[in-house]
Image: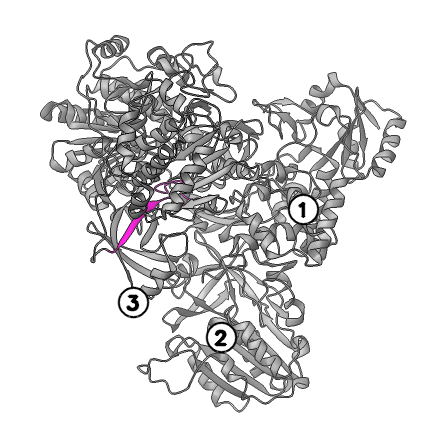
Amino acid sequence: MKILTPNKVDSFFQLLTQKWDVRLPIVLTDGTRVISSLGDGSIALHGGAVSSKPTAAFFPQHSSVFISVNGLIQEQTTPGLPIFVLGFTDRDLECLRFIDRFFANGLRDDIYFTLRSNAVVAGISGYCGVNGALLQPSSGNCDLEFFWDGCRWLIIPYSGAGNEIVADLPDSAPPEAIEAFKKASTALPDENEKILRQASELLRADRVPDSFWSEIGDRCISCTGCNLACPTCTCFGVQDWRSSKTIERSRMWDSCQLDGFMREASGHNPLGTEALRTRRRIHHKLAADPEKWGDISCFLCGRCDKACPTGIGILAVAKELVARFA
Amino acid sequence: MKRTLTVCPYCGTGCTFYLVSDNGRLVGVEPSTTHPVSRGGLCIKGWNAFAFVHHPDRLTTPLIRRDGLLQAASWDDALNLVVEKLKGLQKNYGTDAVMFASSAKATNEENYLLMKLARAVFSTNNIDHCARLCHSSTVTGLAETFGSGAMTNSISCFDQTDLILVIGSNTTEQHPLIGSRILNAVRSGTQLIVADNRRIRLARQADLHLRHKNGSDVALLHGIMHVIIAEDLAEEKFISSRTENYAALTESVAEWTPERAATITGLEATEIIAAARLFASAERAMIVYSMGITQHSHGVDNVRCIASLAMLTGNVGRPGTGVNPLRGQNNVQGGCDMGALPDLYSGYQKVSDPQLREKFASSWGLKSLPATPGLPLTRAMNAATEGQLKAMFIMGENPVISDPDQRHAVATLQNLELLVVQDIFLTETAALADIVLPAACYAEKDGTFTSTERRIQRLQKAVEPPGEARADWEIICRIAERAGYPGMRYSTTSEIMEEIATLTPIYGGINHERLDPHGLQWPCPDIDHPGTPLLHVDGFTRGLGRFSPVDHRLSAEQTDEAYPFVLTTGRTYFHWHTGSMTRRTHLLNREEPHSFIELHPDDAATLGVRNRDELLVSSRRGRLKTQARVTEMVIPGVVFMPFHFAEGAANTLTNNVLDPESSIPEFKVCAVQVEKLP
Amino acid sequence: MTAACHTGLYLPIECEILSVSELTPAEKLFQVRRTDGVPLGHLPGQFIQVSLLGWGEAPISVASSPTRNNFFELGVRRAGTLTGAMHQLKVGDVIGIRGPFGRPFDLSRMRGKDLLLISGGCGLAPMRSLIQYCEDRPSEFGRISILYGAKNPTYTLFKDDLAAWNASARFACSLTVDNSTGKDCYSGNVGLITSLIPPLTFDPSKTIAAIVGPPVMYRSVITELKTKGLTSDRIAVSLERQMRCGVGKCGHCTIEHLYCCQDGPVFWLNEVEHLRGAL
């Protein structure tokens, strides 16, 4: 275990930029906290989960698939520095674990792993949530973890890469605070998790009528924010841009809340109504993914509930569903 | 990675977001979580607002038409030619032979500069912009009744109201983050009346949905006001202390019994009575309207009636009340504020007032400025057809797709001796130009936009423009320079705003630094002023609110045997106006890839039409092919088309008849025939 | 940009068009070969992603059997922008492909059985791959019945093939069209494809049915087959979805927890009939 004192934070990350493309929580000019590069705003490790999804480091909103010049497809051959991302809460790390497995399963998504393979992922936990609230420690599914004990960062490396990052920092014996906290926090019952599990059971038992989805669908303005904010949403669309000499194929985040998402050229659309699309969004996380992967793929990060302008994020819908049909 | 806080370039709601860039390329959008309007959310256009910016179709170099073809040229050649030709035509035909069309997509600074270019450099008041096509009726109608043509209240008021009347606004699609507030308000108990014959999303949640006939708004509002007065539900105290000319209103609505209003509107009298009682019973009621009210040959009358209804029930000057025209474009409020209007300088200061002319002339270093108001955009198009107008300089507008009666619009533009178009893509209009100037888009420049709630916010440059494209304000300054005018040298847009503030009382306290992070609402007369969320609190801008009675007039074109359907036009959620940006945004264009027409199932059955069938739609102006969308969204006898699509362009059909006062075209009603193609 | 080279899951492989022929006014058949000469390596029921650079990609099922030729065939209906652009292509033009993708017909479970091969509209294209396969490996399958329904005589695909199969002792062919104008010199059955099933006699315990066609066709055909005693584990359905990536990632082709492009497109009916929106 290593120690990083607050007065060394800036210089520590500054030094890291020599070998890494460093991304970490920063606060932007209007107070929005996101994960971005040093220099894009002030470092803001405190304040809990950042508003934008940290998995975007590996699956960005828009990325190139290939460029073709004069009919020849050119692979991008200039690898940048490997990515170092700090700012994953333990829930975010669960999300990352989920999409790592998703993109690796079967045919491995090489575009994702181009960014992901050599990246170092750092979790964040301790008394650094909103107003000093406790952020649960991770289960160690990251390269290293930054734990704020109230006056300094205790850094626990879990992997070789993690070790390398903090090699030059001073050592510390693991304080009992972490262990005690870990023990206490695992015993904490999470009311929201219970609701999500109940909702999942209701869906899998087919106990939610279509009229419910119509009602929710009526309140959806198809902004797609729920999908775009979600760290476990992986759907993408593909576009080709052509100019006289070059063709650029790229992919971008897509959303199952759009009528065109599954619409076929013939006009046939398996997700042709708002009710079906709303059902798909919730059902996918709470019933389909458990069927395929054994996990509910919502880890209650809360981002869709914040991004949704009409209050039908996944937890809000799950609560309504449990209240009415449980 | 870099994140730049900026303002959404689509509607007038004024959401802000961060543009995410990586090595000079935009790669995404992240909402601002602290913004008072967008509050961490965006609509689909906002979430995808980065996606067209680097499109390969962007204009990257000036173009000059040579041998009939637009060919790449240098900035020097293009700008010299612009100045030489404009000056030459003015010399031959008079200064008013040229017209400047500004843009509600451009910044306040750019609108101010184009206004200044027209008036100070080219000595003409022929300057206008697309507000003429959307809310000119509001500016005229509310200026007369209230003294100010802007939204009276703030978007936050939707959280503090008891009743919302939405008339002629498809809010969840056209101002989605305002529409979502209305949906949320309804969830927490606010009552909702929707007056619109399309079954829009808000109608599904409405306590009352009034599907009155197109063009019958005056009859409906008269009927409602008649009931309120007859049943003694009017707010007498407000009327007596805050308004004038009430007697004339009572007289004008006296004969508009709900039964009479019912025959014109196609509603039941009971629906009108219910609406009146519901509206009048609310402690705080907001009226929200948009193009459904303004785009009529009696658009100003519609607005007058709305103002009357608000005053009649005392719903002005308090939180959760007010007359709330939702401005369509990101900066259409600012375009008006900046005086890109033929009769007004910035801040609604009249060019006909000698003292104001003197003020602007002396500030701009000139002896005098032209005194006669110029031509409204729509009348300029007619003047060009008739040959009085010889040249148009169009910045960021696409009248070939957006103006009524496309054949007339195209013929007009082709009839000009000079057409200069400054834009980001080679639009259908730019394709007709003699000179095309490549502009930077919203992500590539600084400045300010003013949202529908009068909130002035900063646009900030995230990436460089492509090739040789330049910001509109830089191009305008270079034109002024070449025309020999020394008074338009600025190194930043904040210098332009400083000048605006000195000349424009409602913007008197505005400077760029003060606008961080979430802007200020005008009027903001001095540097210490916190801005004004609510207008007309203690008194109306004009003193007393004025009831302006109107006579009921029918829409200009009525259906008949040859053209039995009413066509009403508008927009879809996924596209923006003429589609130059959204049709180049993959996800948005995938959602609505082609022109369509909404048709009621009963009408479809009569015509033997099925969903997705190809139809021929014709009016007295022209004809087009489009795809059938059979839906109960519309009522029988009425068809709806969005105007975004160049192929199957709804404005081939629309009627170029203008409101006599505001010169707005009647986009919302014309007569068409619909036939199935074999 | 931190993106480094990646290995090519999404990179199209160059192919050359060997011939183009018109199947119907809306459908063309392309003979295609990888320019590097490597065989496609597909099985009946699989599809490929066809790329036209600048136009995008579309999933197209392979219409020929891996048992013949050193090229493969694609039957393409003009429906969207990409397929519209494909219809402009000529011999010698180059296209890109990725794949083959997806789960093919389960030949191991079909071997030794009598087969009912039922297709509608352009569903005959993927079915043709299976029919040719059966034709080339006659000893592996029992009695084979081909049932095909088209919208009208003009829009009947692979007319020559159908005629040859009809003439062949190897197959029992039943064809129909939804409607015929009389102007088209058509003298065969008129009616929906479901009308071809009741007259059939087969032993449900020794028969496997495979269905490929437009979405509206499945339910009614399945009902008819079940009436005849065929159970869901003996009915294979190939489901059409808007497959975009072909590799189970983009999400456009999901049916509840299944990804049609990888878990399908061919499913046994009992795997999907309980899933919402599958049929």
The correct choice, above or below, for A213 with respect to B668 in the image is: below
Q: Quadrant of the C terminus of chain C?
A: bottom right
Q: Residues within 10 Å of mark 1 (few under 14, many from 20)?
A: many
Identified at 36% across, 20% down, the residue is B240
Give the prevailing secondary structure in the magenta stretch. Answer: loop
Q: Answer left or right for A12 relative to B189.
A: right
User: Which mark is nearer the camera, 2 or 1?
Assistant: 1
Badge 2 marks a residue whose secondary structure is strand
Q: Which residues are magenta?
A: B564-581
- Relative image position of residue A149 (x, y in whole percent): 81, 24
Mark 2 in CB contact with mark 1 (< 8 angstroms)? no
> Which residue is at the front of the view, A293 or B74?
A293
- Please name the amino acid that badge 1 sits on: Ala
Of labels 3 and 2, the one closer to you:
3
Rendering coords of residue A252 (x, y %) = 53, 45
Report which residue position mark 1 lands on: A318
Q: Nearer the viewer, residue C246 or B127?
A: B127
Provide the secondary structure element on which disc 1 rests: helix
Residue corresponding to mark 2:
C120
Mark 3 or 1, closer to the camera: 1
For residue A36, side relative to residue A322 (left or right): left
| Residue C244, x across and y down, in percent | 54, 56
Task: Check the image and report above or below for B676 versus C186.
Answer: above
Q: Residue furthest front?
A: B231
Crowding near the residue tagged with mark 2, few <14, some 14–19, many ≥20 C-alpha atoms within 10 Å: many
Q: Residues within 10 Å of mark 3 (few under 14, many from 20)?
A: few
Q: Position of residue C167 (x, y in %)?
A: 47, 90
- Residue occupied by mark 3: B678
